[in-house]
Image: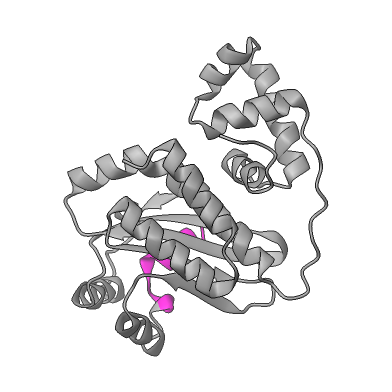
Amino acid sequence: MVTNSRLEEILERLEKADGLEGLQSSIVSLRDEFAIDHLVYHWVDSLGAHSGVGTYSLEWRQKYEQQQFHRVDPVILGCYQRFHPVDWKQLDWSTKAARHFLRVATEYEVGNQGYSVPIRGPNGQFALFTANHTCSDEEWSAFIEEHRRMLVLIAHYFNEKALELEPDRAPEAAQNLSPREVDAMTLLAMGYSRAQVADTLSISEHTLRVYIESARFKLGALNTTHAVARALSRGLIVV
């Protein structure tokens, strides 16, 4: 099990990553930490350039590009239409092209289970963070149930670092969070539910929602999880 303290160490290491080599080193370490077959992060920047880091084999990556599998890959096609994380079993694998793709992927030791987090950044940036493994449905469901929040948080952290690598990217203006916004974001980062956060802070869930939305706006975040990731990456909260 990856604990909150261990997550903090992982995110601190990722925060210090410099360039693609640093991101690649971080994703390999994370793969080993989660004890799964593969982790992959791929993004298309605002200029349309593709980049990626991950643990799939070079042979599979070359095969994927040569065969232009992005045109039929159910993960790419499905996640591009979604805003929320998705288990691969929820995607459409019924077409002949998708079944062929799956057979070839299996030959190159791509696991039968997957969980992908689609991310949309500024100016049309799109990214995908994927955990991949070979195991039973029951084992995978238990893994995702235990690590879902952590995987989403790490996905957004990777995206923050990728955005920093874009050439000529202007730094984002920082806005301080109020003490109550800091409290709310900190407890959410620690894994508290909204009801638990409201109870801990002795406020109503409606008031909590106001704090969260205000923090999200200040951070320029797409959703609450993204807001937590940005608050952590900018040192506005510590868990």
Q: Is residue 107 above or below residue 146?
A: below
Q: Residue furthest left?
A: 136
Pinpoint residue 103: horizontal percent, then vertical percent. 20, 74
Count of residue discs: 0
Q: Is residue 193 visible?
A: yes
Pinpoint residue 70: horizontal percent, then vertical percent. 43, 76
Please state if 188 lies on the left or on the right of 25 as rendered. Answer: right
Pinpoint residue 9: horizontal percent, then vertical percent. 48, 47
Assess whether residue 78 is covered by the magenta stretch: yes
Residue at 65 percent of width and 46 percent of height: 230
Q: Residue furthest top?
A: 202
Pinpoint residue 227: horizontal percent, then vertical percent. 64, 42
Please state if 110 lies on the left or on the right of 12 as rendered. Answer: left
Q: Quadrant of residue 172?
A: bottom right
17 or 136: nearer the viewer? 17
Q: Is residue 212 above or below residue 99?
A: above
Assess whether residue 123 is covered by the magenta stretch: no
Residue at 66 percent of width and 64 percent of height: 163
Q: Is residue 77 visible?
A: no
Please state if 22 lies on the left or on the right of 213 as rendered. Answer: left
Magenta segment: 70-83
Q: Is residue 35 above or below residue 228?
A: below
103 or 49: nearer the viewer? 49
Q: Quadrant of residue 69?
A: bottom left
Q: Is residue 84 above or below residue 103?
A: above
Which quarter shows the C terminus?
top right
